[in-house]
Image: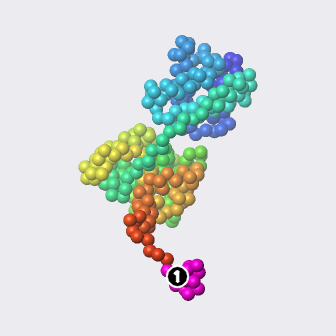
Amino acid sequence: MNTSTLPALVQRFFTDRLTGQLEASPNTIAGYRDTFRLLLRYASQRFGKPPTKLKVEDLDAALVGEFLTHVEKVRRNSARSRNTRLAAIRSFYRYVAMNAPEHALHCQRVLSMPNKRYTRRSVDFIDRTEMEALLAAPDASTWIGRRDRVILLLALQTGLRVSELINLDCGDVLLGVGAHIRCEGKGRKERSTPLRRDTVRTLEAWLKERSGNADDPVFPTIRGDRLSRDAVEHLVRKYTLAASRACASLMGKRVSPHVLRHSTAMDLLQNGVDRTVIALWLGHESVETTQIYVHADMRLKEKALARVKSTTSRPGRYRPDDALLSFLESL
């Protein structure tokens, strides 16, 4: 196979570049894989030939632009998802430019394609009352109910991403002095998150019942396998619906594992925790990422408003309390 053909370059990009050189995470590789699966199928239909017969020149800036429009208009993806697809395509063409210089000009045209601007939505979160209703929803008399309550409690207390939750092993939970959990987040960054006493007691009881080895998942399925992302998202939706019967404010709310993560951040912020600490707690790359919670927190804005004097009040006149200042004021 010619090493400069499109099939060869795509295969080498995934095996050599992403897996070998960058040691990209499974999530990153899966995201790039899905992008190229969609792109190659779209190009194949566009040109009427199988993906293995496509050339680098076929996937030019014009076709990539059409594909991104297809992603938005036909597949109903958001502008943010569209930009994520473009980022994966750009990464591939940077690799092509380095390893197949004859395509450099072609690559540059694709690399110069801009991201699409989009409106940032307000952060969704649940408050303390809604958290308590959600935690009360699982049936503690069943094994699944006890497992699911620990998942919800740990998600709300630690703010772990769903991928971090399902990848937790029993050995990652340390319940002695300075109880905490260890996890590997985005960008292969390891972090430790402390646990409250009530969470420690609940985890102790669960791990005793679960009785797994250090490398076994903390939250297994009935068959002992690791839970999937879909399974966690399903159980969060299920218990949100159940909790809404006791907590009316949950009715109609779309609560996902990531909303639970947002709720952790909002709870920390409303209790006076500094943004820098919240960024470390959640494993954010930058403190600026945590700024979205400040914008979403209505309580902080209400406190600021309370300090501002109403415009309808009559301002008082300054009266100096010293004879010299009175003289200067009269000049």
Residue farthest to the top, as pictured? 48
Residue indicated by mark 1: 320
164 vs 309, nearest the viewer: 309
170 vs 316, nearest the viewer: 316
Q: Residue at x 47, y 53 (%)?
A: 295
143 vs 161, nearest the viewer: 161
Q: Is residue 58 magenta?
A: no
How does the figure colour the protein chain or chains?
rainbow
Q: Residue at x 74, y 25 (%)?
A: 101
**Which amino acid type is marked by label 1?**
Pro
Stretch in magenta: 319-331
Q: Residue at x 44, y 30 (%)?
A: 76
Residue 204 in view: no
Where, quadrant-wise, is the C terminus in this rendering?
bottom right
Q: Residue at x 54, y 35 (%)?
A: 116
Say which quarter of the image contains residue 279: bottom right
Image vertical order of residue 68 relative to residue 301, above or below: above
Image vertical order of residue 197 relative to residue 48, above or below: below
219 vs 196, nearest the viewer: 196
Residue farthest to the left, as pictured? 245
Whether residue 2 sits left or right of residue 214 in the image: it is right
